[in-house]
Image (cartoon, helix red, strand yellow):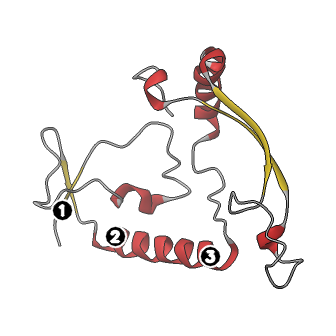
Amino acid sequence: LELVLGEEKEGMNYEKYPWLRSVGLVDERGTCGSGVEYLNLSQLQVEAHKKIQTARTQYLQTGAVTFPEFVEPSALASILEDCTAKEDAAFTTDDTHTPHQLQVDETFDPPNSVRNLKMRTHVASIAYDELPPESEL
């Protein structure tokens, strides 16, 4: 199966996650526009499908998925600079809630379910359009 591979994104850890090269790069016609490189991606696509399915299963079972060093460590410094430069424009929240962003339900059974676990979320978010276009984020 011959497909088209687009330009790799800077900062992505393709060495650790080679299957990322085949995710979301090919349109329904199998092309990516000008300046493309032809590659046989069938093996990478199969690997990507398996990795994504495994991640979905893990998410459904545990509620979380991680990809350690998904972004190359060298890119993190640049991302941190971009975010620090825009931190005054960030939306911040500091709230206590359940994992489902709901109030505690005293009628829920069992009462000690994770559904009723109270947790604190303290987050600052920067809108994508607030970041410079060349940002690795």
Of mark 2 and mark 3, the one earlier in the sequence is 2
Q: Is residue 14 above or below residue 106?
A: above
The answer for how far apart the CA atoms under marks 3 and 1 are is 29 Å
Identify the residue at the far front of this view: 107
Could you say where residue 123 lies in the image, as x and y percent from the top left?
72, 37
The answer for how far apart the CA atoms under marks 1 and 2 are is 10 Å
Of mark 1 and mark 2, the one earlier in the sequence is 1
The answer for how far apart the CA atoms under marks 2 and 3 are is 20 Å
Kindly identify the residue that appears in the image at 65 percent across and 20 percent down: 87
Callout 1: few (<14), some (14-19), or many (20+) C-alpha neighbours within 10 Å?
A: some
Mark 2 secondary-structure assignment: helix
Depth check: give the residue in front, 100 or 36. 100
Which corner quadrant of the image does residue 60 belong to? bottom right
Residue identified by numbered label 1: 3
Which corner quadrant of the image does residue 36 belong to? top left
Could you say where residue 42 lies in the image, as x and y percent from the top left?
28, 72
Q: Amino acid at mark 3?
A: Gln
Q: Is residue 56 above or below residue 121?
A: below
Callout 1 touching callout 2 (CB < 8 Å): yes
Depth check: give the residue in front, 43 or 133. 133
Kindly identify the residue that appears in the image at 65 percent across and 60 percent down: 66
Q: Amino acid at mark 1?
A: Leu
Callout 2 touching callout 3 (CB < 8 Å): no
Depth check: give the residue in front, 40 or 83. 83
Q: State which mark lies toward you, 3 or 1.
A: 3
Q: Amino acid at mark 2?
A: Gln
Residue identified by numbered label 2: 45
Image-based side of 52 in relation to 79, left or right: left
Callout 3: few (<14), some (14-19), or many (20+) C-alpha neighbours within 10 Å?
A: some
Q: Which mark is residue 58?
A: 3
